Structure formats: C-alpha cells, structure tokens
Image: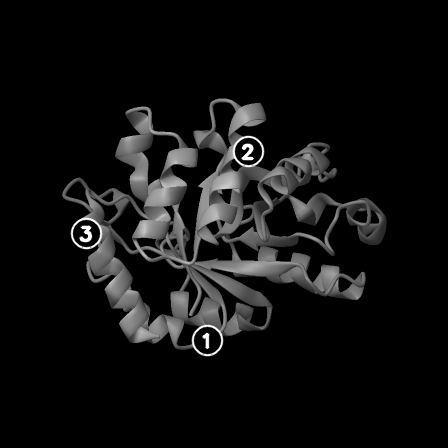
Amino acid sequence: MTLILNTWIFEKDVQSGTSQVDLVERVAALGADGIEVRREYFTDLDSELPAVKKEADKKGLIVNYSVPDEIFKTDGTINPKLGQYFAEGKKMGIQKIKFNTGNFAKFDGDLAEVLGSLPLAEIKMNVENDQTPISGTPEAILNFLTATRQAGFNTIGYVYDLGNWAFTGFDAVTCAKQLVPFCDYIHLKNSLLDAEGKMVTTSGLDRGLFNWRIITSYLPKDAQVALEFPMDNDAAIEKQIRLVTESR
C-alpha cells in the first residue's frame, strides 16, 4: 500500500505558521510514502513550491497536489487557471493533481480539445466527490469520467473521498461499487452528526458513520490511500497509520 498524508492532518500547526515545506520531513519521519500538499496552505508559492520538491526528493517522498478549484466553471466553461495549477505542480514534481469536477453538465465544447493542452502524460489528474450538489454526486463524476474515456483520456482518475458522502447523503458502498473502475486514490476520513446536529469530520477513522474497512474492500487494493482529517499530535497520527496499514 502507498500511504499519503494530506496536510489537513496538521491544520493546527499550519494555522500557527508551520510551512508545508517543514511538514515534508515530518511526514517522512512518520513513515508515510508521500505528502499531499494543499494549495490554500501556501503563503509564498514562488519560494515554497521548489522547496517542497527539494525536501521531498531528499526524503524520497511522493508529492500530490490538492487544488480547491473546479475543472468547469458555473457556466460550463473550462477553468482558465488549470494550466497554471499544473505548472505549479511541475515545480513540486507531483504525481497527482486533484480538482472538483465543477459544472460539467453545462459543458458543450470539445473535451479532447480543452483538456488536450494539459500535461496529462506527466501528471495524473483526479477528480473528487466534494460536498456540493453539482460535483459531489456519483452521477456527475461518472458522467465526466465516462466522457474523458470516450475523448481518449485514459489516465484521468477518481479520488474516492469517504467522509464527503456523509455530507451529500449518498450511500458510500453503492458509490464505491459504481466508481471503482475509475478509482486510483482514496481519501480516508469519517463523519458524524455532532450534538447540534451538524455533520462534522471526526478525529479518528473508527469514530463515525462509516465502516471504512468494509467500504474500502470494494476499492482497488493498489490505489494510493491518504489520511485526510485533522489530528492533535504525532502519536494520534501514528495510531491511524497503523489502523490503515494493518487493514490493507
């Protein structure tokens, strides 16, 4: 199993001023295979992007890139910033870049043309089920990924985000079975309703609505797996790493 740590894990440290560059060494020390950096956590892209690559190369870590933006804008047009995001990823030597699908239902252009300019042979593009009614449904993701295959793009993949299904109300097992042909990455987190009736992400995989072990059994064994939820300290992170590695 290839285990990735998403830097949302270290949210408290990032909010206190810790750079994602500094987190690379910590991720390596925790025994992970890679780090998934979040674009919104960078404060100086020009200096931090090459520094992430330098540190990751030193430690032999995979770098993945989480971008909080969509491929298709509200009106269905392609996002003009996609090329910029891929260029940022190249500076870090990333394997994968993740987006939300956005409003693909409104797109009426030539998919091969609009995606053909992206360096998809060098960097794997993934889409994730987010928490929105536009791109957080299995239908929206299936429609987009099916269309990419028909357009000749066989390497655009899917990130199965377990915790997000709690926010959109879809059955996580059914979605796993539907989307497994496209899945090459899994984001693991659990969710539950808090005392006020608000859906929240929990601090541990064994606390929440989902039996993550059963659900992930429907997903590809060779998919990269990322832990993606805030944790208080390295001891808590190590415990969650053990849970996942012992289950796969």
Q: Taking 110 as reference, is 183 above or below it?
A: below
Q: Quadrant of residue 248?
A: bottom left
Q: Name the residue under label 1.
A: 221
Residue that numbered label 2 is attached to: 49
Residue at image location 73% in from the left, 32% down from the top: 80
Frontmost residue, 54 versus 94: 54
Task: Identify the image quadrant of residue 70.
Answer: top right
Of residues 80 and 85, the one drawn nearer to the viewer in this rendering = 85
Q: Do the residues labelled 3 and 1 touch (CB within 8 Å)?
A: no
Q: How crowded is mark 3: few (under 14 residues within 10 Å), some or many (20 or more)?
A: few
For discs 2 and 1, the disc positioned in front in the rendered view: 2
**Residue that protrudes farthest toward the left in the picture:** 195
Counting residues from the N terminus, which is met first, the one under dot 3 or under dot 2?
A: 2
Residue 208 visible at all: no
Contact flag, marks 2 and 1 (Cβ < 8 Å): no
Residue 236: mark in rendering: 3
Q: What element carries label 1?
A: loop
